[in-house]
Image (cartoon, rainbow, N blue to C red):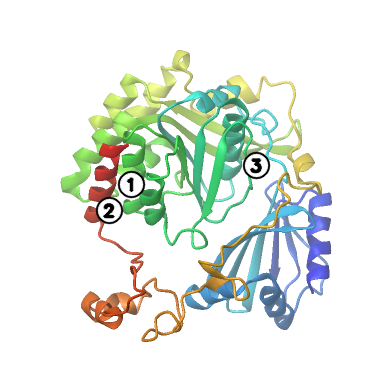
Amino acid sequence: MLKRFNELIVHCAKNGYSDLHITGGQPVVYRKDGQLYYDQPPGWNYQECDQLAKNLLNAKQTEKLRERYSVDFAASISHIRIRINIFNTIGGLSLAIRLLPGKIPTLDKLNIHPSLQSISELKEGLVLVCGTTGCGKSTTIAAILDEINRKRAVHIVTLEDPIEYRIKSNKSFIEQREIGTHVPSVEQGLIDVMRADPDVIVVGELRDPQTMSLTLNAAESGHLVIATLHATNMEDAMYRIINSVPPEAEEYIRYQLASTISWVVVQQFINMEKISFRVPLLSILRGTQQIKGIIREKKLHQLDNAMHTSKNEGMFTAERYQQEFLNTRKQFYNPTVFFKPSEEEIQDTPFHSSIIFDQDLGSKNITSTRFPNLPKKSMARSAVDRRKPREEIDSVVAGNEDYQYIIDESPDLEEIIAETEKLNINV
């Protein structure tokens, strides 16, 4: 089963397919340059999809699939880095696979405007890379990190879900943490990172108010923070952050966003007929005093006009980016070159500490041996646990000499912010 899957991944890489879909009872589906292509039937049957999932997942990932009916993870197959999403459908399990480059492309090789290289020189501030799913946000950020890694001796800590590109430390010291594997949540990761002496913090995605608030706090404390956000234009990106908090906190977060914003890049793909493949189309906003004023005063409808008149400040609307950069660029790099089978720069097998993980089961090694009164499961509170009074859970471990703490993955937002602000004072 795995041999058949490996051959399929190599076939996709050789033919420049960016995505692969395997669903029981249907033909295999490929995506190339944004277009879908169907393989000849038969594809994989329902039982084969189940067996493939069992072979790909470890015990912890299987548990997550059973709880959420979907699971995201990354893996290396025949030296090709892939991101896999397994989810439940009316036809059983379905697998969506994204093929990733074995080596991080440079910004130039991604056909992206060279001005983005200056992000690698920033010491502090907030950089947002926005766009829809599959528009290349993670690859753009990886290219920026690679640029930092080659230029500067800084400490970079990433919080990713999952880790798509494994990055080897060069001039920079890089530590990558995967949500659900190395840290229980983004919120906990953002609290932890403030104690880790970072210079650059990467947040895989701003999905909820807690993550947005903690990310702004990290940027405000003097770090360079790079994050992704689902947004289709500049105004949408700003609104998503500002409207993530209750009305009484909106003014505070507007001022916080205005004081930290450095770059906002909105990315999408367009097909260029003259070269017959897709390239990134960007909108670029810079955190000038004019832009900061617009955000503070919540006059977000003026952002587009400000970008039009700020050409000398390095800003681009999508229309002007296409006219002045894409239409005048003489050399483009074909993205299929980066999806050919190649060895990853990092060949080491990920190590899982036996203190945290059971090496055989691939899950947290917290059992009834250490906590005799507790069931065999992670101490992280499940959805059912969270409905119980905290006192009930505390009473279970009362008197246990080995008891240290309970991980609560849903802490109160005010408590989190208060803790990070306290940490910021000592940074």
Q: Secondary structure at mark 3?
A: loop
* Residue indicated by mark 3: 168
> Percent position (x, y) of residue 71?
55, 67
Tag 2–tag 1 contact (CB < 8 Å):
yes
Q: Secondary structure at mark 1?
A: helix
> Percent position (x, y) of residue 94?
64, 71
Instruction: Name the kind of residue labelled 1 in the image.
Output: Leu
Q: Is residue 268 visible?
A: no
Q: How crowded is the residue under tag 3: few (<14 C-alpha within 10 Å), some, or many (20+)?
A: some
Residue lying farthest front? 401
Quarter of the image where the C terminus is located? top left
Instruction: Name the kind of residue labelled 3 in the image.
Output: Lys
Q: CA distance from mark 2 to mark 3?
A: 31 Å
Quarter of the image where the N terminus is located? bottom right
> Percent position (x, y) of residue 107?
64, 30
Quadrant hosting residue 229: top left
Indicate which disc residue 297 carries: none
